Image (spheres, grey):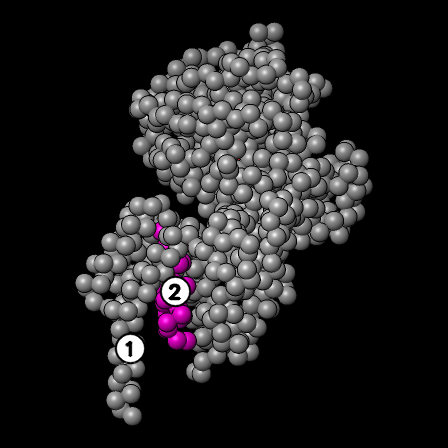
Amino acid sequence: MSLWVDKYRPTSLSKLDYHKDLAEQLKNLIQSGDFPHLLFYGPSGAGKKTRIMAMLRELYGAGVEKLRVEHQTFETPSKKKIEITTVASNYHIEINPSDAKNNDRVVIQGMIKSVAQTQQLDAISQKNFKVIVVMELDRLTKDAQHALRRTMEKYISTCRLILCCNSTSRVIPAVRSRCLGIRVAAPTADEALLHGVCKKEGLTLNQELAVRIAEQSKRNLRRALLMCEACKVQQYPFTPDQPVSEAEWEIYLRETAAAIVEQQNPKRLLEVRARLYELLCHCIPPDVIIKGLLSELIVNSDGQLKTEITALAAFYEHRIQMGRKAIFHLEAFVAKFMSIYKRFLDEGMAAMDFM
Amino acid sequence: MQQTTTELAGKKINMSSEIMPTDGERKSSSNVSVPWVEKYRPRSIDDVAHQDEVVSVLRKCLQGADLPNFLFYGPPGTGKTSTILAAARHLYGSDIYRSRVLELNASDDRGIQVIREKIKTFAQLSVANQRPDGTPCPPFKIIILDEADSMTHAAQAALRRTMEKYSKTTRFCLICNYVSRIIEPLTSRCSKFRFKPLPENILLHHLSAISEKENLDCDKQALRNIISISEGDMRKAITYIQSVSRLYNDKRITSERIIESAGVTGLYFSIASATLVIPDALIDSILETCRLNSYEKLDKIIQNVIADSYSAYQLLSQLHDKIVDVDELSDKKKSFLAQMMAEIDKCLMDGADEYLQMMKLCSHIMQQVCAGE
Ligand SMILES: Nc1ncnc2c1ncn2[C@@H]1O[C@H](COP(=O)(O)OP(=O)(O)OP(=O)(O)O)[C@@H](O)[C@H]1O
Ligand SMILES: [Mg+2]
């Protein structure tokens, strides 16, 4: 049994439930095979991947859904072997550069060249180019991005790139110049979508619960579907006031924030550190952790302090991006918050004494 | 590397498939379909728009004058690569192009070793001053080092000696976006040409010509709209005009359609920093929210801006323009905010989280707007 998220991923452009006109336009765009490289960008959960897959299907037919896992080996100039696992069909290859870490330049170049060198003319699709889908382009090192410049142009007749990222700030201008950017905004009215999915499952969803799930999902469709499915497991038939269950790590993160607000001392800092480690070990990205903490800590602070703490979070998140180990900066953030917060509490006390 | 394409459906022709700059007509008659940027890449240096200085120098070379070493630099899509490829094609024609022109780019391994070996072997061979068929051609070879800015400094230093040693038989053309990353001893050995962003009238002329060739029904205003979001980048301008003409089934381009495809529907042409604007109303409502002095409301609106995947850069620059005119803010407060904006700009460059940076900025704007002096 598959999760609803996967089960109801629309497979063709015309079936996409939201941004209908975008789907239509994409269809027109790719109809004659001379479209440029594409750069899809938008927040996670907005449906970029779904849209890319639907587009590939439009291009090549159902054959693109016959996926296989491939192992490829690349060699760096210093003769180091790098093994990469990719998902591919006869028509496209999908890669995630973060798998290649610092050798992503070698991997992506090798990939493009090997695809480009076997020119194919497919009898069914009548397309003579293959597509390389690069997920998480913003994780690609600058070195690898710079190396893409001429390669993207040289092999364009046999190899089209579809790039995908959350934010374009990390994409170098020369790569942006070579692509058509396609903004994929997160869907707004996803209650409707939830109703739709529930109906297909033969369930009735009440409007109150749908609205609450939609709200809590913060415009993240994937999250909304996961939450909805979790609700169903917990209790069916649905009631309007049933709790919307969150992911375990979200609860854990909230408890961590509560622990920070409760006490500010070295012992507590140590405990919090252990919890942060735990979160990182479960692959929760550090920026998600820091944003999660912020949204909880803010609730316990008043006006002036809110601004200060937001600036603090922004400062340490920047450090995380620049630095090497996230835990250092997460911990520093907590420590700094504790000291500011304690000062704030003490000042509050002093003012009370004075009165 | 391992070959994985053996089980491909359909026919497979093993051939070098890079777009050769030499075959003028290319395989466009068969069903090789390339985007318009490649289709309309200048074939001769006379087709290169706006870069008159370098074109006139090259024209003299084509008439027989000696060629200096070149360094081309400038922003993307201004014609650097096209210019040198066109010139090389002109100099050598398609028959001896391969033996006379070596193109290396950042995708090729260009460590010191390669500079020493590959370039040396190519540069060493002396060449005749005529083609096999007897027509004259220059007595030297050209090595094009595209994307030279991603060569290590050590490799650049190695290049410096090579350049001198083979100066009789070889000319170099270095191309880059960022000239500051090329070491001084190299830049001083080259004639430097800056490729300027293309001005609006040139872009307009070029796009009009393309739209005529492609039989597009395209009004002037629409072209102007495309140009205004292209930032002097011809490549972007061509990509845009092709894409807009494809989005709808007829070949009509109107300014409404451009605005429509750019804004609401999600096909948003502005991926670069200062291209298509965020709706003014949205900027105003952010500022209005700042006046309410409610962090929660601010949080909500910023979350939505991010979820709509507007670029934080764009928001930053538009807020910057607006802040100047906000009456409640004293000059002192404005300069405080301006300083913060500069820092945030740097952080965004470094890849910091857009939501956090925007919240930092807006909550400070809120504080400054609502607090007394
Ligand atoms: N000056 C120009 N005149 C005519 N067409 C141009 C000019 N500049 C760019 N173009 C168009 O843009 C495309 C890309 O140009 P080119 O590859 O020469 O840019 P570049 O300066 O090398 O950019 P980059 O720095 O990103 O490599 C060309 O195929 C051509 O269609
Ligand atoms: Mg170039």
- Give the image location of residue A227, x and y in percent: 49, 52
Q: Is residue B253 visible?
A: yes
Say which element carries label 1: helix
- Give the image location of residue B274, x and y in percent: 56, 54
In this rendering, would A244 be left or right of A336? right
Q: Are marks 2 and 1 in contact (CB under 8 Å)?
A: no
Q: Is residue B198 visible?
A: no
Say whether residue A186 is magenta: no
The residue at the point 41 percent across, 43 percent down is B180
Q: What residue span does the magenta drawing correspond to?
A: A286-312
A161, above or below B304, in the image: above
In this rendering, would A120 be left or right of B359? right
Mark found first going from the N terminus, 2 or 1:
2
Say which element carries label 2: helix
Circle 1 Cα neighbour tier, 10 Å, few/some/many (<14 / 14–19 / ≥20): few
Give the dominant element type of the magenta stretch: helix, strand or loop: helix
A14, above or below B84, in the image: below
B77 or A260: nearer the viewer: A260
Residue type marked 1 = Leu
The residue at the point 58 percent across, 40 percent down is A9
Residue linked to disc 1: A345
> The C terminus of chain A appears in which quarter of the rendering?
bottom left
Residue linked to disc 2: A296
The residue at the point 41 percent across, 31 percent down is A105
Which marked residue is nearer to the observer: mark 2 or mark 1?
2
The residue at the point 48 percent across, 49 percent down is A233
